[in-house]
Image: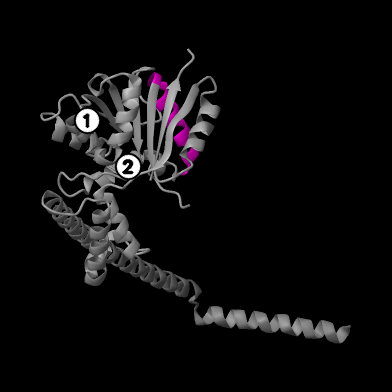
Amino acid sequence: MTEVVGEASSSSGRPVHKYGEAQEWNSRYQTDHGDTFFDWYAGFAELEHILRAHVQELGRSPAEMEVLMVGCGNSKLSEEMHDQGGYRRIVNVDISEVCIEKMKRLYSESHPSLEWYAMDATKMAFDEGRFDLSIDKGTIDAVVCGEEGLVTVTDMIHEMGRTLKPGGLAMIITHSADRAALFDMSVASRCPGWDWKLVHGPEKCHLSPSALLINIMRSHMPGKPVAAIMKDPVRLKAAMLEYKDAMAARGRPISGDKKAQQELFMRELKARMKQAKEGQADAQDDVNAAKKAFIEQMREVLEKRKEAKAKAAAAAAEAFETTAEEDDARIAKLRAIRAAREAAKAAG
């Protein structure tokens, strides 16, 4: 994983997905099991050393800085930055109203200084030059997969820069090493008057424990949903052993609270899988009901067609019914025509 930290100052980015649309994320967050959290890529523990170094260079304390979290999702990063890093003024935006309402409910009492807004990151309502630090963790990676991904990313980077103070920091956490080039391209196309420079990165860092576990599970079930591993005890055991070794190699063996967190994560994963199955069952019931209604409708249509066909045949038969006298007259007429043709032929 890569971080790109940029410094900004102002003179006056396969198959198409719908990750830039609110409906896609509203649907995902509505099916979340309970008040769960998930951090793409990394958490504060993995990013703290980078943040600390550059915040010190700005000469401001975390408590004095105003931070923008772009595409916050249901991440705990803002909470961790507040509790562990001393950042007090964090503004969180996400395109999903469902997500934002959930986060407001969870944090309104315990963290009143955290602000939450349902907002499109490509057209934010904030004033120019408001924030000291702007963070994107995975949002660019998601929206770049969309139908107009590069346009969306360019607009998003423009908004991140527009709302930064001169000398402010933009931090991009991504799976791609080419985001600095994408940042350059976006600035050149949308913001030719800007003066920005790369002050740190790209640099690899550890994934968060939950993201690491999911990646390992996916590597053991290529081409299948991660939940499929729950049906395969052999692969699940292998994945958990690999995860345990990976955490131990970091010097962070799973024990105590960490073990409890992973057990909670596994329970949540099982619950989500069960919920998905129930949703599939409900959907199948709906499909079966629709099929049954369609069959009944087709039966009615066929019966009506059969009745109409019988009526038409009866009407046609009635139209062609004739009396014996009419038949004799038609035969006599045909015979007269034939006799005339033969006479004409003999005369010729």
Color scheme of the displayed model: one colour
Q: Is residue 192 visible?
A: yes
Span highlighted in magenta in the image: 147-167
Q: Which residue is mark 2?
A: 23
Q: Nearer the viewer, residue 345 or 229?
A: 229
Q: Which residue is mark 1?
A: 85
Q: Nearer the viewer, residue 323 or 122?
A: 122
Q: Which quadrant of the structure image shows residue 106?
A: top left
Q: Nearer the viewer, residue 278 or 253?
A: 253
Q: Amino acid at mark 2?
A: Gln
Secondary structure under the numbered disc 2 in the rendered image: helix
Q: Amino acid at mark 1?
A: Gly
Q: State whether residue 133 is above or below residue 72.
A: above
Horizontal side, residue 295 vs residue 270: left or right: right
Q: State whether residue 136 is above or below residue 131.
A: below
Q: State whether residue 51 is above or below residue 220.
A: above
The residue under the point 46% across, 17% down is: 10
- Tags 1 and 2 touching, CB below 8 Å: no
Horizontal side, residue 265 vs residue 42: left or right: left
Give the alpha-carbon distance from disc 1 to disc 2, as whole Å: 33 Å
